[in-house]
Amino acid sequence: MAATVLIVDDNRAVCTALEVLFALHGLKTQSRYTPEDALRFIDEEDVDLVIQDMNFGADTTSGEDGIALFRAIRERDADLPVILLTGWTHLEHAVELMRSGAADYLGKPWDDAKLITTVHNLLKLRQATRENQRLRSARRAVRTRVAGQYDLAGLVYESDAMHEIVTLATRVAHADVPVLITGPNGAGKEKIAEIVQANSTVADGPFIRVNVGALPPELMSAELFGAEAGAYTGAQKARVGRFEAADGGTLFLDEIGTLSLEGQVKLLRVLQTGQFERLGSTQTRSVKVRVVSATNADLRAAIAAGTFREDLYYRLNVIELRLPPLRDRPDDVLVTARAFLDDAHRFSFEAERALLAYPWPGNVRELQNCVKRACLLAAGEIIQPRELGLPAVVEKAVEIHGAHQLPEPDRETLQAVLARSGGVIANAARELGLSRQALYRRMEKFGLHKSESAGGEAH
């Protein structure tokens, strides 16, 4: 289906000239001579690009009609590219609208070659944007199926990178083999371990967590394998170790790279034989435990340095799940942040742009702490950027570039916001940072009706 370029100018000679120019280059056009007719056409037909004048009728100098038209177009379709045709008196307005999302501006008289090149490039971008939206919708359907089929332990995500990890985790969960989860601190390694446990054949068994890095070296053996009374100073009664506690289930060993060489030898034996002795005992005990371990360290480098056993590494690393840092999966930022919100708060449009602009060196853990802090400090129901406590440079970046960073709300987001607002369109629009007309437009796009918005006031 050929792309459609809508020309909006009350000067019919200008429209005719552009129609002829575009026809010579194989482009389909439609011309409208008033903003009202142009908006009506956008409401009723598919438009791929708009070229609009900045003034209409008797108003030949202020450009206010052009500004109003541009904003109305953006409310209807935030991704629709708009080229502004402007005289020198409207240059300042054109620059202002460029900051608000206009694709380009051209002065009158225009350069034919430059205009055609710009139009072709924008139409290619429009096609790519629509294809990305189609793929995003298809990916969301796949993610919905996965969430319905498996227990994801409360994990929410949007990125392809996390989907690959979750898919692999659910696929290997049923296999009775060790899993090694790698990635930076705070990236969500324990959550992936929970998914492996929840979908395993021992899902009904215990899930024992051990932060190996937090255990004193002198108590490591007692913690992991247990101890008899009197085995060490202060051991007044027998102690069950983590392996015994995890019998018939899963043992999650976090920060496995910090385990001492002595502990590594004992761990290797348990993985090989399922047997161990408590500290201070000669009785051999047997357990059946699924071991999932995690580390932020480079274990291959540790092997080369002589601080980690190579044979243990290969025992632990039958399956490796590698988590990327949050900065490498920005699609996960907003869905994760919203999941951390309490029931009494939600983000403003500007706060969400700030969340997207920040690189999150502390990953998901830092994001969670940031949201908790914002909920405590928020003056009202809506969390503003200043309450996130992010560096000032982030707010500056949002001010300059933020308008292009926040994606159009999807169907699930619209439904959730409408439900929270009790169907009050004005409140839902305020939360989303949209006008009421823009919200109605998006509701129509996703087939949502007033009657589906919790039955509340809809005005």
Image (cartoon, rainbow, N blue to C red):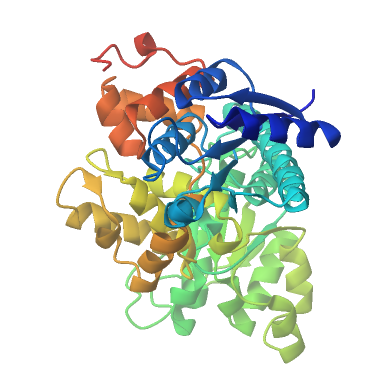
Residue 23 x/y as whole percent: 81, 31
Q: Position of residue 223 (x, y in %)?
A: 46, 69
Judged from this view, the residue extending furthest toward the bottom is: 305
Q: Position of residue 248 (x, y in %)?
A: 58, 45
Please identify the quarter of the rendering in which residue 322 is found. bottom right
Q: Is residue 304 above or below residue 396?
A: below
Tell me the quarter of the image containing the C terminus. Answer: top left
Question: Which sits in the foreground, 382 or 287?
Answer: 382
Q: Say left or right for 366 vs 190.
A: left
Name the one closer to the observer, 268 or 387.
Answer: 387
Name the quadrant containing residue 215.
Answer: bottom left
Residue at the image position 59 percent from the left and 56 percent from the top: 329
Image label count:
0
- Please tell me whether residue 350 is drawn above or below residue 55 in the rendered image: below
Name of the residue lying farthest toward the left: 379
Residue 65 versus residue 368: which sits nearer the camera?
65
Q: Residue at x 60, y 40 (%)?
A: 81
231 to the left or right of 388: right
Q: Is residue 241 visible?
A: no
Residue that appears at 59% across and 48% down:
103
128 with respect to 453 (left or right): right
| Residue that appears at 41% across and 12% down | 449
Q: Is residue 290 visible?
A: yes
Residue 259, x across and y down, in percent? 58, 78
Quarter of the N terminus within the rendering: top right
Asked if residue 216 is positioned above or below residue 8 in the image, the reply reads below
